[in-house]
Amino acid sequence: MINNYLEWIKDNWQKSAVLILIYVLATIIPLYSRINLIEFMFLLAFPLYLVHEIEEYILPGGFVRFFNENLLKVDSHEKILPIDREVVFWINMIYIWLVIPIFSGLGVINISFAAWIPYFFLFQALSHLVMGIKGKMIINPGIRSSFILHTPYAIIMIYLLKNNGVISNPYLNMYMVIGFLFNGLLPLMAKFIILPRYNKLLK
């Protein structure tokens, strides 16, 4: 029973992102007048990333195919793929659906817990640009929301962090390093976990 439910979630979690986005926004928006602006903005991090995931996997979607074919040069019609539903599910559940809400929520208690998130958003946008160049598909699934939503959000957040005395130098600080490292874990995971798993499945 539990296994069947988990399998269903692995196939449909992207679709649930739309409903969760609506629910989270409906919960957060009434808080606008009750908390500080920077705290409110931190709470917007998760729904903003949900918009990004909706673009990657639903509208227009195609990120998995783009990554497999354009970057890893593997035909998406193959039975075994490096980036499959298991990889996509667990990375998004742990990286986005768990880490981002926890730390953005902690940011309401102590800004320092979430000060790395805007830098993560910036590096994530740059990574989509790099992937687009490398994969010869600049307008790739996820790049629109990265630059139209995430980048302006990150710039505003960094401005607020500086104004609130959390950072003195917006261009070089420990939160920028954390954001960079958190983003950099993804290609490391691809090299040392995802690709070895794929090669093992091929045998």
Image: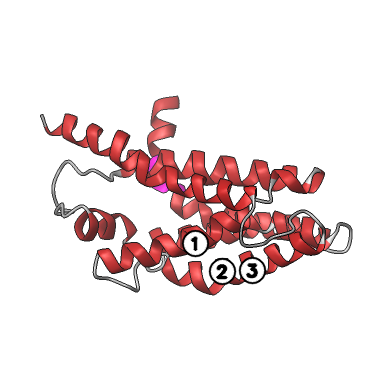
How dense is the environment of label 1, judged by Cα within 10 Å: few (below 14), some, or many (20 and up)? many
Q: Amino acid at mark 2?
A: Thr
The quarter holding residue 86 reads top left
State whether residue 124 is above or below residue 153: above
Tag 3 residue: 155
Q: Of label 1 and label 3, which has the lower sequence position?
A: 1
Residue 141 visible, this angle: no
Q: Position of residue 115 (x, y in %)?
A: 68, 51
How dense is the environment of label 2, judged by Cα within 10 Å: few (below 14), some, or many (20 and up)? many
Q: Are marks 2 and 3 in contact (CB under 8 Å)?
A: yes
Q: How many marks?
A: 3
Residue drawn at 66 percent across, 55 percent down? 23
Rendered-image quadrant of the C terminus: top left
- Cα distance between the residues tagged 2 and 3: 6 Å
The disc placed on residue 135 is: none
Q: Position of residue 165 (x, y in %)?
A: 81, 57
Tag 2 residue: 151
Q: Secondary structure at mark 3?
A: helix
How dense is the environment of label 3, judged by Cα within 10 Å: few (below 14), some, or many (20 and up)? some
The front one of 97 and 99 is 99
Question: Which residue range is magenta in the image?
Answer: 9-13
Q: Of label 1 and label 2, which has the lower sequence position?
A: 1
Tag 1 residue: 52
Residue drawn at 44 percent across, 33 percent down? 5
User: Does residue 99 appear to the left or right of 44 in the view shown?
Assistant: left
